[in-house]
Each structure stands twice: as structure tokens, then as C-alpha cells.
Image (cartoon, helix red, strand yellow):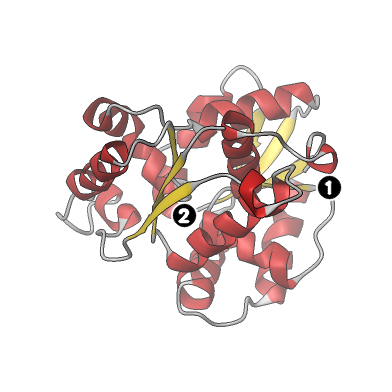
Amino acid sequence: MKKLGVIGGLGPMATALFMKMVIEMTDAKTDQEHIEMVVYNCPQIPDRTNYILGKSDRNPTPEIIGIGRKLAAEGVDVIAIPCITAHYFYSELTEGIGVPIINIMDEVRAYLNQHGIGCAGIMATSGTVQSCLFQKALEGSCRLVKPDEIHQEDVMHIIYRNVKANLPVEQDRFEKISEYLKEQGAEVILLGCTELSVVREEFPLGKEYLDVMRLLARCAVERCASVKEQYRGWI
């Protein structure tokens, strides 16, 4: 069994939910069969979206690398970052930390290809959308549709004014965005921000959604231990 490092706090609720997912997905019958995790919950790291969009000059990369190096010193074998926007800095983080980091963009591409998805919709931060993280990852493989400006404002409202503010998710906003993306041809909607994983905890969501953080959790378990049978197919 390998040791998992988690760069957390981006945000805190998403980190707590990620840990829960890893524990639930691990094929373990005793405490001792669960994955050893070293988690640094650091919510003080500068906002990734604000930096990417040029609204802040506080580069979060040095602080994330600093945490990654602490994890490396703890002897972790692989690192997961339950913040999709942070993957914008993936190359710098990999080079600066020196421990393998799960590349969730590559995993999403492989997963959609495996399940024959030709068109996906995206709900994510404006930083993730405007930096084209998913667009580049899926190019030539799967068509990606994104919200228009008004619906993207609704996505950001759910992320920042609901989940990050520790308030209930406004289901009507979420459903309105979903319907728009389906009208654009989306067969599956990617919950491409870890904060949006909280929606799945509050409301039942069907197979027309792919919770990217759930995929990240499964990948983490696969690299460190064994995944329960029920999580090996569509998640």
C-alpha cells in the first residue's frame, strides 16, 4: 500500500469531502487496510481563479509547491490536489515538488473516451474555463460546451456564494445551468470544480453528470490500494 499526500484547503469543504470519497472507495474491511493520508489543509493559499484572470498579483504556485515539498518530506508516494483550477499550474508544481501528482485532466479525457462520450458540458470556475484546461485536454477527443456569460455567473455564484460561503446550494441555479448545457448538446456535464461536488451531497444526480473530484478520488485509491467493485465503472 502506498501513502497518499493531499494538498488541501482549496477549499476546505472540498478537501473534507475528498477524504470521505477516498475512504468510501477503498476496498478495506479494517482500519488497517485503509490508505495512509497526509493532508495539509491550507485555505490561506491565494485564490487561483483571481490570479489566472489577472484580478490578483498573488501567485499561489510558490505556496502550493511549499506544501508539496512538505508532503514529499513525509514520504508520500503520490499527491492529489482536490482543486481543479490549481491544475492550471500542473507543470510548475510537478517540477517544483518532485513527487508524482495525479493529472486529473488526463484522467477525465481517458474516462470520457472509455465511455464513448462525444460531447460534454463544463461547470467550473471562470479561471478553469478561460484558461481552457478542459478544452485543451479534450481537444480532438470530445467536444466541450461551456456556459454563456450569464450562466457562468451562476456557476461562480454557486461556487463562491454558496459552497465557499458555507451556505446551501441554490438548486434552481444549478438546474438552470444544466438545462442550458444539455440544450447545447452535452451528453454528460462535468462538475469541473471540487466545490461542485458538494451539490451531489445535497441533491441526487444521475449518470448525466461526472463529478471530477470523485474521479480524482478513485484515481488516488487506484494508485495506493484497491478500489471497491461498485466504483470501477461509471461513477
Q: Horizontally, is 233 left or right of 81 in the view?
A: right
Q: How many marks?
A: 2
The residue sitting at 73% across, 33% down in the picture is: 119
Q: Amino acid at mark 1?
A: Lys
Residue ID for mark 2: 125
Q: Amino acid at mark 2?
A: Thr
The residue sitting at 18% across, 44% down in the picture is: 62
Direction top: furthest residue: 140
Taking 23 as reference, is 62 above or below it?
Answer: above
The residue sitting at 26% across, 48% down in the picture is: 67
Direction bottom: furthest residue: 167
Image coordinates of residue 52 in percent, x first then y, are 29, 47
Image coordinates of residue 122 in percent, x first then y, are 61, 46
The alpha-carbon separation of the residues under discs 1 and 2 comes to 22 Å
Taking 93 as reference, is 48 above or below it?
Answer: below
Image coordinates of residue 48 in percent, x first then y, are 32, 53
Image coordinates of residue 158 in percent, x first then y, are 55, 70
Residue ID for mark 1: 207
